[in-house]
Amino acid sequence: MTTVTVPDLWPRNLSDSATEPSPVAILRQQGYKLGEHTDEVVFGEIVSEFIRPDHYNHEFFLVSPPFKVRHRLFNVHHKVGNYPCDIKLYFNDKVLDQKTDLQDSSQFMHALQELLANELVVSLVQSLNSQFQEID
């Protein structure tokens, strides 16, 4: 039996890094940071999907394993090129706030920071975190 060597057929530029962080990379980092702030009582989980051949949708869920809670907090929509993008804040499937046509990672992070500071978001995280603290 002869062994056939198949060469690597992928283009060499696949690992070229982007000049700025993508929306989903920023979301993942913030989900992780939330877990650090709450000792993993509450953290962010991101679910991504193609919604058309050239568009992504990323949903950010607040997750609290001790309470079996998984709540969609917001979603981000963008073309394959990452920017511009749109972000919508939800509560019970109702849009509470949205930021559209964010042109780069700086605008995206500023908008995301505003949404994360929303009174309802802060109250929800504080409520889940304090309930866990009460049962220790």
Image (cartoon, grey):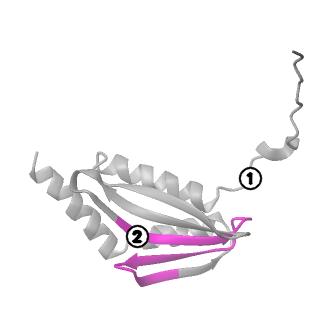
Quick check: 123 above or below 95? above
Q: Which residue is mark 1?
A: 18
Dominant secondary structure of the residues highlighted in magenta in the image: strand
Q: Which residues are magenta?
A: 71-98
Q: Quadrant of residue 7?
A: top right
Q: Is residue 6 left or right of residue 88?
A: right
Amino acid on which disc 1 is placed: Ala
Camera-nearest residue between 78 and 39 = 78
| Category of crowding for the residue at label 1, using alpha-carbon neighbours closer than 10 angstroms: few (below 14), some (14–19), many (at least 20) | few
Name the image quarter holding residue 69. Answer: bottom left
Asked if 88 appears above or below 37 in the picture, the reply is below
Kindly report the distance in space between the C-alpha atoms of the residues bearing marks 2 and 1.
Answer: 27 Å
Image x and y of residue 115, in percent? 44, 73
Foreground pick, 115 / 78: 78
Badge 2: residue crowd in 10 Å (few <14, some 14–19, many ≥20): many
Q: Position of residue 31 (x, y in %)?
A: 44, 55
Q: Residue furthest top?
A: 1
Q: Which residue is mark 2?
A: 73
Q: Is residue 81 magenta?
A: yes
Residue 42 horizontal side relative to residue 85, left or right: left
Query: Amino acid type of disc 2?
Result: Leu
Q: At x 30% / y 75%, what residue is drawn?
A: 120
State the residue in front, 96 or 122.
96
